[in-house]
Image (spheres, rainbow, N blue to C red):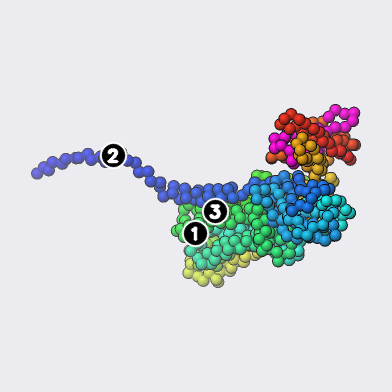
Amino acid sequence: MTIPLTIVDERPQRTGRRDRRIPAQGRKVLGLLLVVLGCWATLLISTPAPTGDPVLRTISPGNSETVKSPDRVELTFDRPVPAGLATVRIINPPGEQVVFERPVNPPGRPDTISVPMPKTRFGGTYTVAWTLPSQHLEPLSGAFTFDVFQPTSSAGVPEIEIRHDPAIAAFHTTARFAAVASMAVLIGAVFFVAAIWPAGALLRIVRRVVTGAWIGVVVSTLAVLLSFGPYAAWVPLGDAFDPQLLWGTLRSETGAGLLSRLLLLVPITLGLVELMAAPPAERQGERALRGGAVVGCGAALAATWSLARPHAELTPLSLAVDVVLLVSAAVPVTGLGMLWLLLRGKDRSARHTYVPRWYRSTGACAGLLALVALYHLWHSTDGSVTSHSWLLVGLLALIGLLAGTTTVLRLRLHRHPADPAESKADRRKIPHLEQYRNLAAGGAGLAALLLIATALLVATRPPHTAHAQRIEPTPSSVRQQLPPFRLPFDTGKPGGNGAVDLVLLPRADGPGRVHLDTRVSVRGGPGDMAVTAELRRPGRAPIPVRLTAAGPGYSRGAATVPGHGDWELALTLRAPDGSRQTVTQPLDVR
């Protein structure tokens, strides 16, 4: 009997819709990328650009000016300043210091600090002294006088304490070091879990290490934030909770960097919770993705180390070097401690599975540390013993220690290959496993001591400035600043007396040449009054000083004085109606 067979060609019908769902691996990559981008976006948004050291450009009352009884003394700088970190003292004609409260920024004027005059006032000469922390936390200071109704003899210059209280110095330095150490442990431990030992996220002791490091970052950062105000303003630790001092800290560049670190912990914590709760990654590609995400987020966290410490000039290159230094040191050194925890466990294949992963990542970190060492070697070529020299020595020692530890571990792995029968023995009775643990513990301890010593040498170094190195001439911005010259002029209106506040910042510009940084502030004149300047000397052609507007009534410019001797800076003011007049200031260039 023949049974006919019919073949029906059934083809899937096209519905016109495509499956646009992202594959599981793509979703993982996208999620990790969003966490890293979120960290860097938070850092870039919350960190302000560095502004440099402030320069006093105008004061009210003016230096040696005779005025009626003023209500306030105001000092205006060329950039915003945290008034809470400033100190202003006033001596009245009888010789009493009368102002001890912290200055404030008047509403809408972040570049000005203001203090009230005392309620009881005397006619005569008042002397004002002020101080502000520079970017290196060196004191920027100055003094000037003004007369109420009539001049009298000055009773002296107010004294301002510019030495750190030992208690606040010790507390602040310890808090800074604890913050860096906590960040290093957090970055290194999370990387070890993500890229080397994924199953470690399930262990309570590993979770305690990660949680403890996170808490350490938060607590130590808050401690630095609290102690920075007294440290920068040279006041005792008991004043740490002064509201004005705290507000000044938050408005400073260091305070902004510390706040950025705390804000950055929000996306980092979200990613950390997701990582610790995710199933352990078995494939090498997934471990590499997780490790890369940890490095990306850790680099953003490490950047706050540079952004939240006093510095003169932070370039993208120096910031990148600092980030590479901290991350490359954190991963292998913390990894040694995590390796010790790993070898204490019951995973009998640990030394053959995870140790090779560790020393491969350690080799990459040692190479990056070598590049950092070359950078600091380049900055230490002048032969002087600086912080770069100490850091270079510490880096070379750390690289040698990591290389030696890695070599010993690799030799022991080749000498003791994996044995299938080993699982039936008690691992605590196998001598070479105990040696692995001891080697990991000893290497971690030595590396930690080395990092601590290097960090302390760098943290306690004197500020790397011309002032600290005693190079002449000392820049005017890091020593006592002279008060502005006040040059009066007639506005042409009844009772319309104006004034020009002139700030001159000279510095050597080669043999027999002086570079003159000029700041001009016009007070009391029309807002659109134009100002031109030139250097004059009998028998020589005038040298123009190109001024550019830097704000309402404020101009900046620079010129090079080609020789020593008696010069004159002439400022020509042109009003909107076409009238003009010239005021001059003699210059003795030596």
Is 513 covered by the magenta stretch? no
- Determine the CA span between mark 3 and mark 2: 43 Å
Q: Indicate the position of residue 335 as horizontal and vertical percent values.
A: 59, 59
Sooner in the amino-acid sequence: mark 1 or mark 2? 2
The residue indicated by pointer 2 is 14
State how far apart marks 1 and 2 are (Cα): 42 Å
Question: Is residue 393 in view?
Answer: no
For residue 540: magenta?
Answer: yes
Residue placed at 87% from the left, 29% from the top? 540
The quadrant the C terminus occupies is: top right
Residue 3, percent from left and from top:
12, 43
Separation (CA) of disc 1 from disc 3: 12 Å
**Mark 2: amino acid:** Arg
Could you tell me if the residues under marks 3 and 2 are in contact, i.e. CB atoms within 8 Å?
no
Task: Please state which amino acid type lies under the numbered disc 3.
Answer: Val
Q: Is residue 581 above or below residue 385?
A: above
User: Residue 49 location in percent, x, y?
Assistant: 64, 46
Q: Which residues are magenta?
A: 515-542
Q: Closer to the camera, 552 or 47?
A: 552
Task: Please tell me which of labels 3 and 2 falls first in the chain.
Answer: 2
Taking depth in this image into account, of 475 and 306 the one nearest to the observer is: 475
Quadrant location of residue 336?
bottom right
The residue singled out by tag 3 in the image is: 294
- Name the amino acid type tagged 1: Val
The x and y percentages for residue 490 are 79, 37
- Tell me the residue at 52%/64% (across/down): 207
Task: Name the residue rendered at 66%, 63% in the picture.
Answer: 241
Q: Residues within 10 Å of mark 1 (few under 14, many from 20)?
A: few
Query: Which element carries disc 1, helix, strand or loop?
Result: helix
Instruction: Check residue 273 in the rendering and tell me which mark sits there, or answer none.
Output: 1
Residue 71 visible? The answer is yes
